[in-house]
Amino acid sequence: MRRRSLIVANWKMHGTVASVQSYLETMVARAMPTGPEVVICPPFTLLPAAVLIATGSEVVIGAQNCHWEDKGAFTGEVAPTMLVDLGVRWVIVGHSERRQYFGESDQTAAARSQAAQRAGLDVIFCLGETLEQRETGETMTVLERQSAVLAGLDPARLAVAYEPVWAIGTGRTATTVQAQEAHAALRRRLAGLLGTEAAAALRILYGGSVKPDNAAALLAQPDVDGALVGGASLDVEGFCAIIHAAPGGGRGAGE
């Protein structure tokens, strides 16, 4: 079974109102391929402008994080209900940078994911091993631990992003064999947690220095259902090329 590709742009802490307007107007003006689902995740400050521009188009807007409560004394945080109020449909949770720099744990990522789904958001749940963990043969141990919390989530509102930490922003990319092995193992793991049918339908994305020149090979793997794209997503032409590289991406938005 070939699942519909999901291609996600994670802008991280980049962009201005002017840049998001130019970027999305360029995308919306083109004939987007009907195959892949496309999600753009700019910083919080750009979400209102992004939603306004993307409304009525095939482009969907997502956020990069959310809190686990709907309201309260949590200075600097953004509730999932606030994102829904803006018209946001997806949210990234548990990204490796949140885990590395901001103390995100498996438990807090699970709480954010549960709150997001209760609010009506779809969740992109990130997991992946460090270089040290891969070199010591701990990859599957790490993925099993990080994925354990997914048992409490609705698989119909979930995508999982495998992001080997050693390949994020480093220019290093997992080989197609490494990516497929990790994705296939994750799907087997998820079958035990969520059920065989749900795991078969769930999309597992690859994230880790995805670029136009390596996207086609990665996305051709049977258990790689899309990509979580970081730096390469900041360039609209490059990101469109990645969209076209996905199965069913065809031609159109890059022309």
Image (cartoon, helix red, strand yellow):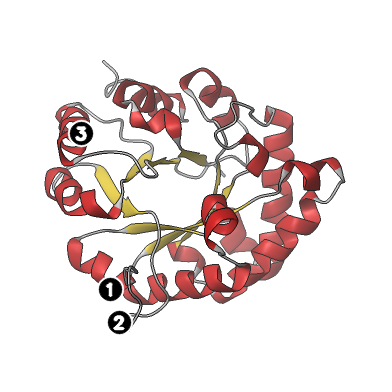
Q: Closer to us: mark 1 or mark 2?
A: 2
Amino acid beneath label 3 = Ser
Which residue in the structure is indicated by mark 2?
71
Reading the image, the residue beneath label 1 is 81
- Between label 1 and label 3, give the one nearer the viewer: 3
Residue 67 found in image quarter:
bottom left
Tag 3 or tag 1, which sits nearer the N-term?
3
Q: CA distance from mark 1 to mark 3?
A: 26 Å
Left-right relation of 7 to 171: left
Disc ID at residue 19: 3
Q: Quadrant of the C terminus?
A: top left
Taking the image as drawn, is residue 126 in sight?
Answer: no
Q: Callout 2, which amino acid?
A: Lys
Residue 82 spot, x, y in % from top left: 24, 70
* Nearer to the camera, 14 or 205: 14
- Do callouts 1 and 3 mark residues in contact (Cβ within 8 Å)? no
Residue sitting at x 19%, y 68%? 85
Sequence order check, earlier mark of 3 and 2: 3
Relative image position of residue 27 (x, y in whole percent):
22, 30
